[in-house]
Image (tube, rainbow, N blue to C red):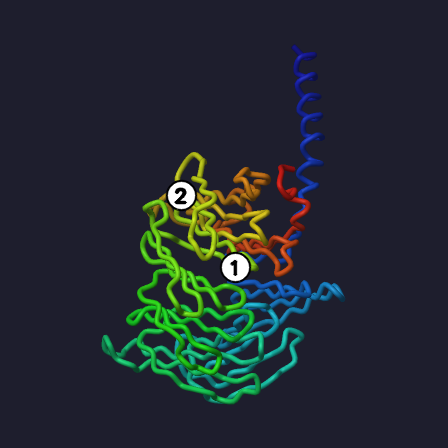
Amino acid sequence: MKKTVNILWVAIFVSSALVWPLLAAEPWEILSQSPGAIESATQGAAGDVCILERVRFTHLNPATSERVLRELPMAERVFLSPGGNIYASIIYEGQKDMANASQLIIYSVDGRKMWSIYHHPANDVYPLDSGGAIAVIRNINAPIGGVESNVFFFSPNGELLKQVSIPAPGEVKASPSSDRILINSGIEGAILFDSAGEELARLGSVYRMSLSQDGRWVAILYGPKMSLYHEGQPIYVGELGGEIVRGASFAPDNRLVAAFTDHAFFLLKNPGGQVILQRRLDLDGEFSYTSIDLTLNASCIAVGVERDLGSNIKGPERHPEGKVLLYNRDGRVCYQMSESYSRWNTTTPRVRFSPSGDQLMVLTRDEVMRAPLGALCVKGGER
């Protein structure tokens, strides 16, 4: 019996010794850990990473390996530009949910102040990579159909270019090229502007929306339908799988677009809308997709996945498992990363490729990680 036990312990030790190097060899770099507090992160073309937490802003400079931290007081919020080159700060008079801002400041990624405005009303500000900004003031007490909410368009030197009244402005998206702004009005649907505040097109009712990197293409998601617009003109509309379409992402050259519902994702040709790849989520339990992104020619497609146990379960166990899956062009899984809630307390993985397509960044509410794509998935095959 004793001999059998000793052999068993040896077997466990050997198997652990074999598994541990595999785990240790995982190529993920932990850029930030802040339980429940990660709000957003961006990767610039030069490899700079900006990470926004509730009370802290971090800039990682790959050229100097510097990590610059900035603590944020409770009366201040920070917003990142799409390309990660600019960030904006609002310092509020009184509470953060009030629209009365004592100062609006635009910074370059190295912390240099570019311009500022005192006592400008704003709930949120969306910096542009050009140095301009979009400020939004929302009057939640305005009557239905009222125009007590305004959007302000600022130039790269802080000049107010235009003020536009938009009822119930919601999500605002800007292209890294900074010349297209997409605003979701809860009453009037999605509206496309240029950076000077000139209205270009009205795109109808919207649940979620996506803007291409050059700002020329827009995906409007509403129910099971996805509509594609080019420079504000409708090009394609179709239904995807009968479920609500939750998100979409354009390839860098706009020739392909990926979209996902709760339990399936689709790869479509653009502009024709022909579905060239469809995959359903083949996982046990109540899993659903949370995000999607793709590289040029869809040589690699990344998706985030989470398991939801239902609204009756609270606390860290609310989302007890998150996954990141990578698919190659023919739809085969070439990499899978899985974590438990012991590490990710709120697992809603958001996947995002770097502008060059050679790095994959994953955000949860607790962590920001990234890894070189070549270490995860071999182009056209499995690793």
Q: Amino acid at mark 2?
A: His
- The extreme left residue here reads 144
Q: Is residue 31 left or right of residue 338?
A: right
Q: Is residue 198 left or right of residue 90?
A: left
Mark 2 and mark 1: Cα distance apart in space: 24 Å
Q: Nearer the viewer, residue 44 or 138?
A: 44
Q: In the image, which is nearer the foreground, mark 2 or mark 1? A: 1
Tell me where residue 366 sits by quadrant: bottom right
Which label sits on residue 322?
A: none
Q: Residue at x 70, y 17 (%)?
A: 6
Tell me where residue 353 sits by quadrant: bottom right
Residue 333's place in the image compared with 174, above or below, is above
Residue identifier under label 1: 254
Residue identifier under label 2: 263
Q: Quadrant of the C terminus?
A: top right
Q: Residue at x 49, y 56 (%)?
A: 249
- The extreme front residue here reads 272
Dot 1: what SS?
loop
Q: Position of residue 183 (x, y in %)?
A: 40, 71
- The extreme top residue here reads 1
Q: Position of residue 189 (x, y in %)?
A: 32, 69
